[in-house]
């Protein structure tokens, strides 16, 4: 084993934990809410608190790395993530769970971008293709496997173990990183001249933006005063942050990196892949749970093929990367993802794991092709001095893409379900022979019900309403997948504008 491989593997294990926990509770929120006696409108905060905290810290990770060094920042992040995971498992009510989940996201977030920048130190030349493939696979597979692993743990043990499973690997990473990782040295002098007002503006702006995106659909967007206020606060503070970052001498985030064409395009493509990865993870379990009535475990098994296909895509990417320009591979990956979304647009209310198999393979297999090249083409085009600061932006764009994609998809599901239901209902008239036969069959089936003057007919009409709503909802899911397809077609057409990047030297440990 090469000397640089073991520390990279250990750091990747920490990154995998942090990414896995974004989605591990997704299929088990009802169980957590029941265990903590939480109201329906409180449960989603188990997810939202984690995401808000994480999106604040990720852009700061470059500056934190320069202050505390890669070794000690990653160690502290792994230790904090492990302790907060234990606290989440011990939570006694929904309020404590929300606080501990926020801590988990806050403390564990630095592990994600730090791995991206460290790979440029550990690997040179063609070996960077392998490291990018590993990182790309983790970035796509970990969130995909989250609901699968979470569903299995909840059904076989209980929801507390969603968090306790982090303890042993978290402890191992916390112990090994100080022993193995030695990339740079801390520079505590940077604490004196840091742009703290910029940090505050960025934290407030991103936190309120994430809140708007996560909670907007549930509260009917700008009909809600809190959502409207948060949107204004987010817009104004982020504008202030951008202006300040461009005028101060020592900005906490290097926005000028966007003048590099590859980095700017890489961030946009990272945003698009975030939409694809996180939004499909959101939509598919939602469809299986609400339309098909699947349990958490059944949902996990139904979407497992996506994770398996992603793992198979890694060796294929490494093999092909030796012969083809990474831009062509990325185009193929984005196009294949668009093809997968097109196949999802034919979804019906009867789809199960068998019908989902091919679309999910088409979705899972190309994910590493879409993610890995953007790492080398986007980040690899920057100078070592800018790399650390820019990596946080790059990773934030993927998470922000996921948040935007989920928010837009939720809005599509709400509006398009109503639209399709109205259209279906307009055809349910006494002149509709198929409807009359359906009601007559249901009427005879429910005719033996004892209560009411005409219980059979009332039950038949209720069944008709449920069937119409189910079909309307399914059509709305198809619309959401179609929108994602269009986004990936646009992304595919953007890839040729990336410049080819020659292998670069490792970043210096100097500040």
Image (cartoon, rainbow, N blue to C red):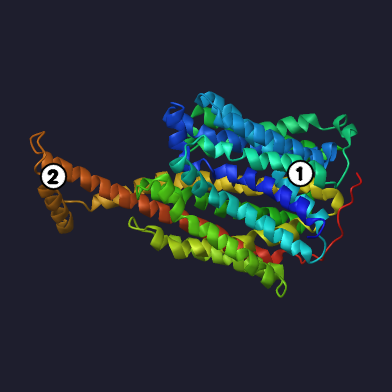
Q: Is residue 222 left or right of residue 334?
A: left
Quadrant hosting residue 52: top right
Left/right of residue 293 with respect to residue 345 in the rendered view: left
What residue is rendered at 54% in x and 43% in y?
A: 24
- Whether residue 346 is visible here, answered yes or no, is no
Residue 394 point in image, percent of width and height: 71, 49
* Dot label at residue 198: none
Q: Quadrant for the C terminus, please.
A: top right
Q: What is the distance, in whole Å, between disc 2 and disc 1 at their CAs?
A: 65 Å
Work out which residue is located at the far bottom of the displayed protein and give it: 323
Number of residues whose C-alpha sits closer than 10 Å to that of mark 1, classed few (under 14), some (14–19) or many (20 or more): some
Q: Locate residue 483, reporting x and y percent.
A: 49, 56
Mark nearer the N terminus (2 vs 1): 1
Residue at 13 percent across and 56 percent down: it is: 437
- Residue 45 lies, with reference to residue 274, above or below; the image says above
x, y (%) of residue 166?
61, 40
Query: Does residue 41 lie above or below 412 as drawn?
Result: above
Residue holding disc 1: 176
Asked if residue 468 can be seen in this view, the reply is: yes
Q: Which residue is mark 2?
A: 446
User: Image height check: is 90 above or below 136?
Assistant: above
Closest to the observer: 382 or 74? 74
Residue 111 is situated, as x and y percent measured from the top left of the image, at 71, 43
Say which of 82 and 66 sits in front: 82
Q: Helix or strand or loop: what does disc 1 sit on? A: helix
Task: Determine the residue positioned at 68% across, 68% down.
Answer: 318
């Amino acid at each position: 084993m090469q000397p640089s491989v073991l520390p990279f593997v250990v750091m990747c294990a920490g990154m995998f934990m942090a990414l896995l926990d974004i989605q591990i509770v997704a299929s088990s929120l009802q169980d957590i809410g029941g265990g903590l006696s939480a109201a329906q409108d409180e449960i989603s905060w188990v997810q939202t608190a984690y995401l808000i905290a994480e999106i604040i810290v990720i852009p700061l990770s470059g500056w934190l790395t320069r202050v505390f060094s890669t070794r000690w920042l990653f160690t502290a992040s792994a230790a904090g993530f492990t302790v907060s995971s234990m606290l989440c498992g011990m939570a006694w009510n929904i309020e404590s769970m929300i606080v501990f989940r926020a801590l988990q996201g806050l403390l564990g977030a630095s592990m994600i971008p730090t791995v991206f920048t460290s790979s440029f130190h550990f690997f040179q030349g063609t070996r960077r293709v392998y490291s990018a493939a590993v990182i790309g696979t983790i970035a796509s597979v970990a969130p995909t496997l989250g609901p699968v692993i979470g569903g299995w743990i909840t059904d076989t043990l209980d929801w507390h173990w969603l968090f306790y499973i982090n303890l042993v690997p978290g402890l191992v990473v916390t112990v090994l990183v100080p022993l193995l990782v030695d990339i740079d040295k801390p520079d505590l002098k940077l604490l004196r001249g840091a742009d703290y007002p910029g940090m505050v503006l960025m934290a407030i702006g991103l936190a309120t933006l994430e809140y708007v995106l996560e909670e907007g659909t549930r509260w009917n967007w700008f009909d809600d005063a809190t959502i409207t206020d948060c949107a204004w606060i987010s817009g104004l503070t982020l504008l202030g942050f951008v202006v300040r970052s461009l005028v101060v001498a020592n900005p906490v985030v290097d926005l000028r990196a966007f003048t590099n064409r590859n980095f700017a395009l890489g961030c946009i493509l990272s945003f698009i892949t975030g939409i694809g990865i996180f939004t499909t993870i959101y939509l598919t379990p939602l469809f299986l749970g609400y339309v098909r009535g699947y349990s958490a475990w059944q949902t996990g098994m139904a979407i497992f093929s996506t994770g398996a296909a992603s793992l198979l895509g890694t060796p294929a990417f490494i093999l092909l990367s030796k012969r083809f320009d990474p831009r062509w591979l990325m185009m193929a990956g984005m196009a294949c993802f668009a093809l997968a979304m097109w196949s999802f647009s034919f979804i019906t209310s009867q789809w199960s794991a068998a019908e989902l198999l091919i679309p999910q393979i088409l979705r899972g297999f190309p994910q590493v092709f879409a993610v890995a090249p953007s790492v080398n083409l986007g980040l690899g085009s920057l100078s070592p001095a800018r790399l650390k600061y820019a990596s946080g932006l790059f990773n934030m764009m993927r998470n922000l893409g996921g948040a935007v994609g989920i928010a837009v998809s939720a809005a599509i599901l709400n509006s398009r379900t109503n639209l399709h239901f109205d259209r279906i209902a307009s055809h349910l008239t006494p002149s509709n022979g198929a409807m009359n036969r359906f009601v007559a069959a249901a009427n005879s089936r429910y005719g033996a019900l004892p209560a009411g003057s005409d219980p059979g007919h009332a039950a038949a009409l209720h069944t008709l309403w449920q069937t119409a709503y189910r079909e309307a909802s399914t059509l709305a899911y198809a619309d959401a997948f179609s929108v994602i397809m269009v986004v990936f077609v646009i992304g595919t057409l953007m890839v040729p504008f990336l410049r080819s990047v020659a292998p670069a030297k490792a970043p210096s440990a100097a500040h």
